[in-house]
Image (cartoon, rainbow, N blue to C red):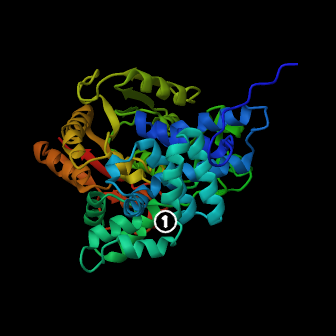
Amino acid sequence: MSEQPRRPRTSGKPYRRPKKDPVRILAFEALRAVDERDAYANLVLPPLLRKARENEGPEKFDARDAALATELVYGTLRWQGTYDAVIATCVDRPLGDVDPPVLDVLSLGAHQLLGTRIPTHAAVSATVELARVVLGDGRAKFVNAVLRKIAQDDLDGWLERVAPPYDEDPEDNLAVVHSHPRWVVSALWDSLGGGRAGIEELLRADNERPEVTLVARPGRATAEELLGEDAAVPGRWSPYAVRLTEGGEPGAIEAVRDGRAGVQDEGSQLVAIALANAPLEGPDRRWLDGCAGPGGKAALLGALAAERGAMLLASEKQPHRAGLVANALDGNPGPYQVIAADGTRPAWRPGSFDRVLVDVPCTGLGALRRRPEARWRRRPGDLEGFAPLQRGLLRTALESVRVGGVVGYATCSPHLAETRAVVADVLKQIPDTDLIDARPLLPGVPELGDGPDVQLWPHVHGTDAMYLALIRRTG
């Protein structure tokens, strides 16, 4: 019998195959998609979780696994700025020289150490194992060394070390402590009108996980029907809103699957409701949603229009988004039409509509709770790119509404350059217009400011930071 060949001797400990942790591997894959493809976590994560839950093997996900993966992804993205400041003090090179996949693993580890209740030893060992699987043994040693430095203090201790004193640089202090780019802190502070308490409350709200909010589309579903779901409570302000206080899976709800209800922030619902209820002179038969994608507001507007016997035209420039609008409106109880058209080059005659909504493309700074990666992706220069489009869409909307009709200008950004500045500039060019006081059209909603426009806030109203100006065409 021949002797079996022996493996060559190696120095050190015997090789151990790294343990695969499906939760952390999934979180890493989601972060890489956000970084490499400019994807949004709210679009990337659901299919990854669905695929993991469909796995029948020993690594099958359960609800706790899904919850942990979700927290790791969103928590890491929300606190990326703070964690970068901490990691930068623990590495021997500029942060920009650290390979992005390594930085993602380090950030995942930092979040477990500083932002969760996972025990220190478990956070370090699990992240090092992840590094061995996705990066290799060599870089796993680097990850281990850095995480052990981070683990030497808690979040408060690190903030004292890496954040400049508030008295010396308030904006930079808030940027590091609350994990927002400095320019975003400055812009939000300007929009709030000053005061430390308000800006800190807003920044904290941006880092909280938002509730899932549903909309019952009138004529197709009722809020009472949705309140029969587990952990469902009424919305705060919209009569069509229902909040799922424990998260929940909207796709598991029959009314949502059927399109009779949808997922829609309460701020977005209020914008559509206010436009629908704005006082109107003359007929009320034709409504336009001039920036209809992906279709949430269009579906609510279409249902409200149907109650009045009015018809909705939903226009969206991008064909694939127009398809989403068509899906959202499918089954609407009244007449509607969906077209793919450029809102700045209308496919309809001037003065064709009684009510017009333009929820214009913007920086999205009002939805940072739901899309935390947007705060790191946007740049101040983006404002200049959006400005001509926003003004062009509002001008076209005012030209598209008849005399006596109403236009609603909305953004999911509180930045003054995207809200009041746009409205003021366009109304100077089109003098035969009046601003309508939007506040009475949001009954029961507190702290709406001096008007006539309305700015909603996450920390005040529990909604995205939606802005709305209502304008009547007078000539």
Look at the image and tell me whether residue 133 can be seen. Answer: yes
283 relative position to 263: left or right: left
Residue 329 % position (x, y): 52, 29
Residue 199 % position (x, y): 35, 69
Residue 393 % position (x, y): 25, 36
Label 1 crowd (10 A; few <14 / some 14-19 / many >=20): some
At horizontal 23% and vertical 33% (from top left) the residue drawn is 396
In terms of depth relative to the viewer, which is nearer, 144 or 53?
144
Q: Quadrant of the N terminus?
A: top right
Q: How many numbered markers are drawn?
A: 1
Whether 406 is drawn above or below 337: the answer is below
At horizontal 66% and vertical 38% (from top left) the residue drawn is 9
In terms of depth relative to the viewer, which is nearer, 440 or 299?
299
Whether 370 is drawn above or below 254: the answer is below
The kind of secondary structure element at disc 1 is: helix
- Location of mark 1 (residue): 149
Q: Quadrant of the C terminus?
A: top left
At horizontal 36% and vertical 65% (from top left) the residue drawn is 176
In terms of depth relative to the viewer, which is nearer, 17 or 295?
17
